[in-house]
Image (cartoon, rainbow, N blue to C red):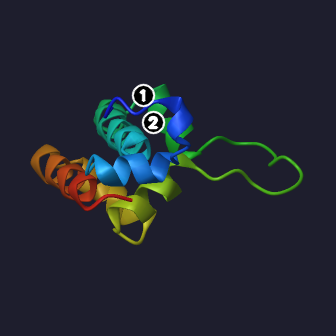
Amino acid sequence: MLRIPWTAKKTNERVLNEANKRRSLVRTIRKRQGTFLGHVMRRGKLEHLVTTGKFEGKRSRGRQREMIMDGLATWLETGKVLDTLAAVKDRDLWRDMIANAYKQGT
């Protein structure tokens, strides 16, 4: 990034601070999850059932896995999954929510 030799023994955080950059991998992943979720929810097919977890049958033993919807509702600061699902229906609102959450970071 700044052509710093490996023998300088600088940490990644220090190099990022010197270059005035931030880590962005998690933010990029969340943004792509959000856009994919909007696409899937508007289609309303099998993927919709998978992401909302509306399958019949027994739950597996042990701690339940975190669902995609729970993580995105937290990231978008909507509070509830139902509010997030309602926002998906309006494409312009959904795009604005994703863009604002992306700008704010994680």
Q: Which residue is drawn at 33% across and 61% down?
A: 76
Q: Position of residue 81 (x, y in %)?
A: 44, 61
Residue 95 visible, this orientation? yes
The type of residue carrying mark 1 is: Lys
Q: In which quarter of the image is residue 82?
A: bottom left
Mark 2 burial class by Cα count in 10 Å: few <14, some 14-19, many 20+: some
Outermost residue on the front side: it is 7
Q: Position of residue 93 (x, y in %)?
A: 14, 54
Q: Position of residue 36 (x, y in %)?
A: 35, 33
Name the foreground residue: 5 vs 45.
Answer: 5
Q: Where is residue 35 in the image (x, y as percent from the top left)?
A: 29, 37
Residue 22 visible, this orientation? no
The type of residue carrying mark 2 is: His
Q: Name the residue under label 1.
A: 45
Outermost residue on the bottom side: it is 79
Task: Please determine whether, in this image, residue 40 is positioned above or below residue 76.
Answer: above
Q: Which residue is drawn at 32% across and 58% down?
A: 105
Mark 1 burial class by Cα count in 10 Å: few <14, some 14-19, many 20+: few
Question: Which numbered tag is attached to residue 92?
Answer: none
Question: Which numbered tag is attached to residue 48?
Answer: 2
The CA distance from mark 1 to mark 2 is 5 Å
Name the foreground residue: 41 vs 105.
Answer: 105
Q: Do the residues labelled 1 and 2 touch (CB within 8 Å)?
A: yes
Name the foreground residue: 82 vs 16.
Answer: 16
| Count of numbered labels shown in the rendering | 2
Screen quadrant of the N terminus: top left
Q: Which residue is drawn at 49% across and 45% down?
A: 12
Name the foreground residue: 83 vs 68.
Answer: 68
**SS for dot 2:** helix
Q: Which residue is drawn at 18% across and 50% down?
A: 99
